[in-house]
């Protein structure tokens, strides 16, 4: 990704010859921004002496020079990020993509099997270390933390460590999750609880850990990874789908609360992605059933591809993790400073069928 000047230097430069205070340069946006500032008179957006926030405040000189200034800062240079579920798959791709865009990254992962009910192997400390090597190969700093997102204290400590060692924590991505299949009528207490606790409570813990560090700085980007299954039901996947719908409700509520602090909160909904969570016979059986096929005891990848391709919008059976990560990076940029409370589908077209 091309490096851009820092946010403060790049934001909406005046056009050549334009005087910022010239009456001729007063725009509709300036008038709106000025009225917003007037309405908020008396409320200090930035305490005297505090650092300039990365996101411009309504009415600030940098925000009001033109209706059409390009707002194209896609660089994350100098930002500090925390990503959960960082050891492999989509989480690893997000860490590397954030680093490629310029961010230092703290990657947190449980790096062991979460529950014996998973039909795929747990991640390992070596995989977490490999993510670190890939981040450092981008020339950025890396902190690896082995912790469970269900442990709020551990998440809070990790967020504080990133804030201290990177100088500030600007970005948080709640990505860690598990998937357990089974009919709702046969669901065990433990399986229901594990899925909801890791996927939904883990994301809530992430928001709760990072928001107090972002609020005083009046800037922040939080992205939670939901799923296509957070947008429609999935047979034998009730706990997972419920957790992923819940993440969207969590995101929208947090966006309402944190917006006044110039912190954005969004979700990304991947479609089927080629990771350990997908590449296993248990998931393939469910994919075959979804396609109306009767799965054999040991379904093969070829069978699943053959079953999925006829209805696949972009004629691919599933996406790669690094095809999801750029959507997350975008939502973390200054360019996305007014995108909040939104669901962002990265599904290779599945979402064309189920959402308006
Ligand atoms: N793979 C897909 O098809 C797909 C589709 C839609 C959404 N998603 C979502 O994308 C995200 C990443 O999934 P993935 O496919 O890369 O799966 P994955 O299993 O490859 O990676 C998940 C990572 O989260 C970690 N993790 C699990 N529980 C944890 C816990 N309690 N604390 C800390 N870390 C924990 C795992 O160790 C693992 O490294 C998840 O939120 C998942 O629900 C995946």
Image (tube, grey):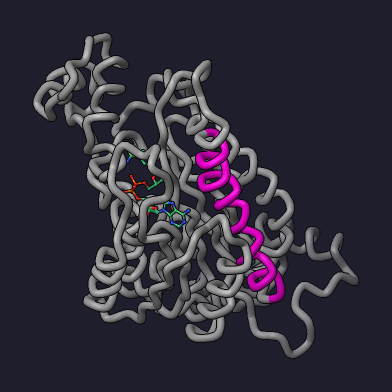
Q: Is residue 154 visible?
A: yes
Left or right relative to 93: residue 83: right
Percent coordinates x, y for residue 285 in the rendering? 26, 22
Q: Residue at x 45, y 18 (%)?
A: 183
**Residue 23 seen:** no
Q: Nearer the viewer, residue 241 or 124?
A: 124
The residue furthest right is 42
Which image quadrant: the N terminus? Answer: bottom left
Where residue 245 appears, x then y in whole percent? 56, 33
Front residue of 233/52: it is: 233
Q: Which residues are magenta?
A: 192-216
The answer to whether 90 is drawn above or below residue 291 in the figure is: below
Residue occupying the far bottom of the picture: 49
Q: Residue at x 23, y 45 (%)?
A: 320
Relative height, residue 76 to residue 274 (above, below): below
Does the magenta segment cover residue 208? yes
Q: Quadrant of residue 268?
A: top left
Q: Quadrant of residue 216?
A: bottom right
Front residue of this view, candidates 326 and 115: 115
Q: Position of residue 24 (x, y in %)?
A: 64, 67
Main SS, magenta residues: helix
For image coordinates 51% across by 63% down, the residue present is 172
Q: Is residue 281 above or below residue 25?
A: above
95 with respect to 33 (left or right): left
Disc tally is 0
Q: Vertically, is 29 above or below 181?
A: below
Residue 284 placed where, x, y %? 24, 27
Residue at (52% x, 57% y) in the render: 149
- Indicate whether residue 36 is drawn in magenta: no
């Amino acid at each position: 990704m091309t490096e851009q000047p820092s946010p403060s230097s790049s934001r909406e430069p005046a056009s050549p010859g334009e005087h910022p205070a010239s009456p001729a340069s007063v725009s509709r946006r300036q008038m709106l921004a000025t009225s917003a500032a007037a309405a908020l008179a008396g409320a200090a957006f930035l305490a005297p002496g505090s650092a300039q926030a990365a996101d411009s405040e309504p009415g600030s000189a940098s925000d009001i020079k033109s209706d059409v200034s390009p707002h194209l800062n896609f660089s994350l240079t100098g930002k500090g990020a925390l990503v959960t579920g960082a050891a492999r798959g989509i989480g690893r791709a997000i860490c590397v993509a954030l680093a490629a865009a310029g961010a230092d990254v703290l990657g947190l992962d449980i790096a062991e099997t979460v529950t014996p009910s998973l039909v795929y192997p747990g991640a390992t400390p070596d995989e977490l270390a490999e993510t670190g090597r890939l981040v450092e190969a981008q020339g950025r700093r890396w902190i690896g933390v082995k912790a469970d997102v269900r442990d709020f204290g551990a998440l809070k400590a990790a967020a504080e460590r990133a804030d201290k060692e990177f100088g500030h924590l600007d970005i948080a991505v709640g990505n860690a999750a598990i998937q357990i299949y089974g009919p709702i009528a046969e669901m065990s207490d433990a399986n229901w609880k594990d899925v909801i606790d890791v996927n939904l409570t883990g994301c809530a813990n992430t928001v709760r850990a990072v928001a107090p560090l972002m609020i005083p700085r009046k800037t922040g980007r939080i992205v939670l990874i939901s799923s296509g299954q957070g947008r429609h039901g999935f047979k034998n996947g009730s706990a997972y789908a419920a957790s992923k719908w819940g993440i969207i409700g969590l995101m929208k509520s947090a966006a309402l609360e944190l917006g006044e602090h110039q912190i954005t909160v969004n979700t990304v909904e991947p479609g089927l992605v080629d990771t350990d969570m997908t590449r296993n016979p248990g998931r393939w059986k469910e994919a075959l059933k979804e396609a109306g096929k009767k799965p054999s005891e040991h379904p093969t990848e070829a069978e699943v591809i053959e079953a999925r391709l006829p209805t696949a919008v972009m004629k691919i059976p599933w996406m790669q993790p690094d095809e999801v990560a750029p959507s997350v990076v975008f939502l973390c940029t200054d360019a996305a400073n007014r995108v909040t409370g939104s669901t962002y589908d990265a599904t290779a077209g599945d979402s064309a069928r189920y959402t308006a």
